[in-house]
């Protein structure tokens, strides 16, 4: 069985072994988007940056995305 991006990040599974895998947004352990194991790692913390009211571009603050 093949998963992942077959052109640049292929994963070829051993058909003689049962695999448990998860599609993740990045940081996989067998391909960039595939994690093999009982449970994937927790998602990364939210990004920190400068956020403003999108309508007026005022009320700006530094923090995680609301």
Image (tube, rainbow, N blue to C red):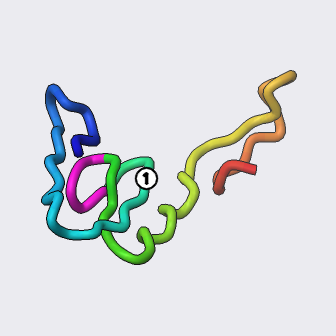
Q: Position of residue 64 (x, y in %)?
A: 64, 55
> In percent of the image, x 79 and y 27: which residue is there?
54
Q: Residue furthest bottom?
A: 38
> In percent of the image, x 44 and y 48: which residue is there?
25
Count all numbered tags in the image, as a single digit.
1
The residue at which mark 1 appears reads as 24
> In percent of the image, x 15 and y 65: which residue is there?
16
Query: Does 34 appear in magenta?
Result: no
Tell me if residue 53 comes above or below residue 21 in the rendering.
Answer: above
Q: Nearer the viewer, residue 35 or 43?
A: 35
Q: Nearer the viewer, residue 56 or 64?
A: 64
Tell me if residue 28 comes above or below residue 9 in the rendering.
Answer: below
Tell me if residue 21 comes above or below residue 12 in the rendering.
Answer: below
Query: In the structure shown, which secondary structural element does the residue marked by tag 1 occupy?
Result: loop
Say whether residue 54 is left or right of residue 12.
right
Query: The magenta stretch spans which residues?
Result: 28-32
Say whether residue 4 is left or right of residue 24.
left
């Amino acid at each position: 069985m093949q998963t992942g991006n077959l052109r640049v990040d292929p994963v070829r599974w051993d058909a003689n072994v049962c695999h448990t895998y998860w599609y993740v947004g990045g940081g996989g352990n067998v391909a960039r988007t595939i994690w093999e194991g009982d449970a994937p790692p927790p998602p990364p913390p939210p990004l920190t940056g400068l956020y403003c009211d999108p309508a007026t571009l005022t009320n700006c603050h530094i923090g995680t995305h609301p």
